[in-house]
Image (spheres, rainbow, N blue to C red):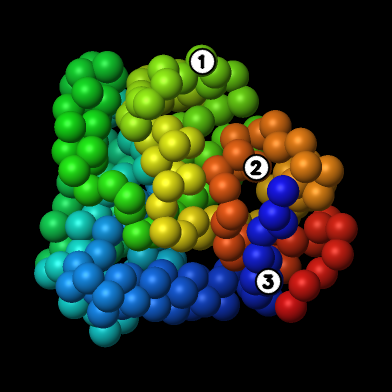
């Protein structure tokens, strides 16, 4: 089992700068190689500072396809919508091609419709990820089991509201060119150390341990309980 590359930053602002630099570099490399690039954004709160900085990076967004790793089943203008968060912090500011998960639909229908769009864009170049206090990532939770073989998008249930979710599967995340995990704050430190321990032992259990080789980008607080510190 390969251990993640860990990049640790003094604080949240430095983390956001570093993450914006890395994501812009990954997208620029894909554009240089193929004339276009694709990324799946993660949701909730951590990515917002990175999004705002990314919007100002010199990148030809007109050839970037933006997808979402997951979405809450709420309308696109709902405060809980990952699309709304991304729109406000990034997508309103760049001319990217945006492929929204239709959270206003029933989860199963939204998943089917999104899979039809996503299927034609795989493998993605970059997948951004977050991690919840329970070790979930995207909307793949510890209790999310029995995913249909070959499925690329599924409906899941979150233990915290909004309960109905739509998420990319492990297969899609693992198949991407690069995975970038952003973690900020001491509340995630213990869980991150647990996941790192799973990877060191070669027995990944928690969702964020099962997504394949990933670049872990953290602030000092989130990294404070890792077994060893890499620069
Ligand atoms: C979601 C996210 C989820 C998120 C983690 C971390 O829809 O909630 O995709 O996987 O990345 O829960 O959330 P925070 O960044 O708010 O800590």
- In this view, 77 is above or below 86: above
Q: Marks 2 and 3: CB-CB under 8 Å? A: no
Q: Assess mark 3: CB under 8 A from ligand 1?
A: no
The answer to which image quadrant residue 159 occupies is top right
Which residue corresponds to mark 3?
8
Q: Residues within 10 Å of mark 2 (few under 14, many from 20)?
A: many
Going from N to C along the chain, the mark reached first, 1 or 3, is 3
Task: Find residue 122 and report its horizontal and vertical position in percent.
Answer: 28, 47
Q: Assess mark 2: CB under 8 A from ligand 1?
A: no
Helix, strand or loop under label 3: strand
The answer to which image quadrant residue 186 occupies is bottom right
Which residue corresponds to mark 2?
209
Which residue corresponds to mark 1?
146
Taking 13 as reference, is 123 left or right? left
**Figure disc tally:** 3
Task: Find residue 17 and report its horizontal and vertical position in percent.
Answer: 48, 77
Q: Residues within 10 Å of mark 1 (few under 14, many from 20)?
A: few
Give the foreground label among 2 and 3: 2
> Marks 1 and 3, Cα distance to the nearest angstrom?
35 Å
Task: Find residue 152 and report its horizontal and vertical position in percent.
Answer: 34, 32
Could one spot residue 57 in this view of the protein?
yes
Residue found at x 70% / y 54%: 2
Going from N to C along the chain, the mark reached first, 1 or 2, is 1
Residue found at x 34% / y 76%: 29
């Amino acid at each position: 089992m390969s251990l993640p590359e860990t990049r640790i930053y003094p604080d949240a602002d430095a983390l956001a700068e570093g993450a914006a630099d890395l994501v812009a570099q990954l997208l620029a490399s894909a554009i240089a190689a193929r004339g276009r690039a694709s990324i799946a954004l993660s949701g909730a709160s951590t990515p917002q500072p990175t999004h705002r900085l990314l919007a100002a990076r010199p990148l030809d967004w007109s050839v970037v396809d933006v997808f979402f790793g997951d979405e809450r089943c709420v309308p696109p203008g709902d405060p809980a919508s990952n699309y709304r968060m991304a729109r406000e912090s990034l997508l309103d500011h760049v001319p990217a091609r945006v492929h929204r998960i239709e959270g206003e639909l029933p989860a199963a229908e939204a998943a089917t419709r999104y899979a039809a769009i996503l299927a034609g864009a795989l493998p993605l170049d970059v997948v951004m990820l977050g991690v919840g206090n329970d070790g979930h990532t995207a909307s793949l939770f510890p209790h999310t089991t029995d995913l249909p073989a070959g499925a690329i998008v599924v409906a899941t249930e979150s233990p915290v509201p909004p309960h109905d979710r739509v998420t990319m599967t492990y297969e899609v995340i693992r198949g991407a060119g690069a995975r970038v995990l952003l973690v900020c704050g001491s509340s995630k430190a213990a869980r991150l150390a647990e996941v790192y321990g799973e990877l060191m032992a070669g027995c990944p259990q928690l969702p964020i341990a099962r997504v394949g080789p990933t670049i872990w980008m953290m602030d000092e607080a989130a990294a404070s309980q890792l077994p060893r510190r890499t620069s």
